[in-house]
Image: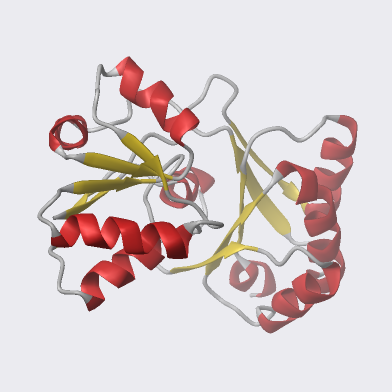
């Protein structure tokens, strides 16, 4: 069985009893970053062996994990934070397992996009998740142009070192919309900040961006 196990996005207490039990009982944990996952496993006294499964070894390691699954081993797939398969290479292993008729079950739990969406105050009955914006400005602006008429709440992930460039492109392409910017969710310095793209860019020019960011925009409300 392949278990898709959600792990905390910050606060280690945000894990389910079932997730801890599953991680203790499987034969192997496939983790995006074993060093990061060890913080969790040590905290909950989980001594299950860990192996790395990330973007640059997903194809070679995927075949290795598939063989173990075919041999009757139980494997838990985890990401650094949140739910595997969402903006990480976990979906490749899930897809491989499904193609080979390996049984799969989900151990649900935290995910940053839902935490940010529910805290944003923006409409969440209908939304679109776009993952990370493209790294290069030309591709990023093209993606933003394609979403200019979107009426649903739009959710992005963004890294701290690209935040200012992303906000600048959003400001110029979308006409400086109001953005909800969430970072360090469930952690000590959790912040959910709502302001125009320009004001947010000014703020994070003065205050170094830290932590992973979730950006949320509702263009439909702005344009109505």
Front residue of this view, candidates 128 and 153: 128
- Can residue 105 be seen by looking at this rendering? no
Describe residue 30's horizontal placement relative to residue 102 as left or right: right
Visual colour scheme: secondary structure
Quarter of the picture containing the N terminus is bottom left
- Where is the C terminus found, in terms of image quarters? bottom right
Whether residue 56 appears in this view of the structure is yes
Is 59 displayed left or right of 96 in the figure?
right
> In the image, what residue occupies the spot 52% across and 72% down?
152
Which residue occupies the foreground of this view, 134 or 199? 134
Q: Position of residue 141 (x, y in %)?
A: 80, 74
Give how far across and how far down residue 153 sits, in percent: 53, 65
Q: Nearer the viewer, residue 92 or 208?
A: 92
Picture quadrant where residue 14 is located = top left
Point 78% across, 58% down: residue: 166
Is the residue 180 above or below the residue 81 in the image?
A: below
Q: Nearer the viewer, residue 132 or 129?
A: 132
Where residue 97 appears, x then y in whole percent?
24, 67
Q: Position of residue 133 (x, y in %)?
A: 67, 64
- Position of residue 47 relative to residue 169, above or below, is above
Q: Is residue 184 above or below residue 140?
A: above
In the image, is residue 200 above or below residue 36? Answer: below
Identified at 80% across, 55% down, the residue is 167
- Total numbered badges shown on the rendered structure: 0
Q: Is residue 40 left or right of residue 55?
A: left
């Amino acid at each position: 069985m392949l278990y898709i196990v959600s792990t905390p996005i910050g606060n280690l207490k945000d894990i389910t009893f079932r997730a801890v039990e599953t991680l203790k009982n499987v034969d192997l944990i496939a983790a995006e970053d074993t060093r990061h996952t060890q913080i969790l496993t040590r905290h909950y006294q989980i001594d299950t062996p860990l192996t790395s499964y990330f973007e640059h070894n997903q194809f070679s390691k995927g075949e290795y994990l598939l063989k173990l699954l075919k041999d009757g081993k139980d494997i838990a797939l985890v990401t650094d934070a949140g739910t595997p398969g969402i903006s990480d290479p976990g979906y490749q292993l899930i897809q491989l397992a499904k193609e080979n008729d390996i049984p799969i079950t989900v151990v649900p739990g935290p995910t940053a996009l839902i935490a940010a969406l529910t805290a944003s105050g923006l409409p969440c009955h209908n939304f679109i998740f776009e993952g990370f914006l493209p790294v290069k400005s030309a591709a990023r602006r093209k993606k933003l142009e394609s979403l200019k008429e979107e009426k649903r709440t739009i959710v992005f992930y963004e890294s701290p070192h690209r935040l200012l460039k992303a906000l600048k492109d959003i400001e110029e392409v979308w006409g400086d919309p109001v953005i909800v910017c969430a970072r360090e969710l469930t952690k000590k310095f959790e912040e959910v900040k709502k302001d125009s793209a320009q004001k947010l860019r000014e703020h994070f020019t003065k205050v170094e961006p830290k932590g992973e960011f979730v950006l949320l925009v509702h263009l439909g409300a702005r344009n109505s």
